[in-house]
Amino acid sequence: MENREFRTLTCYTDGASRGNPGPSACAYILMTRSGDVLEERAVFIGRGTNNEAEYRGLLEGLAAAERLGAVRLEVFSDSELMIRQMAGAYRVSSPRLRPLYEEAQALIRHFREVTFQSVPREHPLIGRADQLCNKVLDAGGGRADRQGA
């Protein structure tokens, strides 16, 4: 395994809501830069909006990356709103999103560096995270997860 002190991980996140608000789930996929999946997980988060689900996916991914010893993290999402808010380009005016944003800001302080990048919904790993969300929603809650090597 590579030296944990210099470990950079990549995190793909997604959130889904059936209704806005409605039953919601979030998912993340954590990978090494060489493309090995370390962990993927989806969580039913109850009733919420799509934007809340997107932030929950980020929070779950950040917590998992910290647990796995990441020092640097590259975050990818198809939520342009969340990415731009986290990057500081948009301010957070929603009272529903503000606490999630603040929690994410607190978590990113645990890393040496975190970057945020918007990717199209069609990106294969965003598609995989979306599938994980829908699997949990189809099952009516619970969670889906898999840990890699």
Image: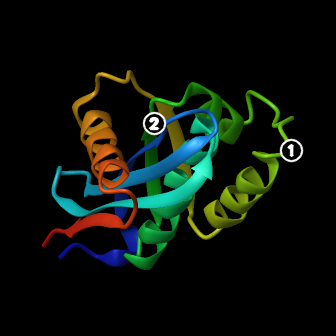
The front one of 74 and 47 is: 47
Give the labeled residue for mark 2. 77
Q: Residue at x 44, y 78 (%)?
A: 67
Mark 2 or mark 1: which is in front? 1
Q: Is residue 113 left or right of residue 119?
A: right
- The amino acid on which the numbered mark 2 sits, given as a three-letter code, is Ser
Q: Is residue 122 left or right of residue 74?
A: left
x, y percent for residue 25: 46, 51
Q: Residue at x 70, y 35 (%)?
A: 85
Local crowd size for mark 2, using a 10 Å CA cut-off: few (<14), some (14–19), many (≥20):
many
**In the structure shown, which secondary structural element does the residue marked by tag 2 occupy?**
strand
The front one of 19 and 119 is: 19
Give the vertical position of 2 relative to 19 (above or below).
Answer: below
- The amino acid on which the numbered mark 1 sits, given as a three-letter code, is Pro
Quarter of image, res 59? bottom right
Q: Is residue 106 left or right of residue 41?
A: right
x, y percent for residue 135: 27, 50
Look at the image and tell me in which quarter the N terminus lies.
bottom left
Q: Residue at x 25, y 51 (%)?
A: 33
How far separated are the C-alphas under marks 2 and 1? 22 Å
x, y percent for residue 80: 57, 26
Q: Is residue 22 left or right of residue 121?
A: right
Give the labeled residue for mark 1. 95
**In the rendered structure, which disc, 2 or 1, sits on the residue that comes first in sequence?**
2
Look at the image and tell me in which quarter the C terminus lies.
bottom left
x, y percent for residue 129: 31, 44
Give the vertical position of 9 relative to 129 (above or below).
Answer: below
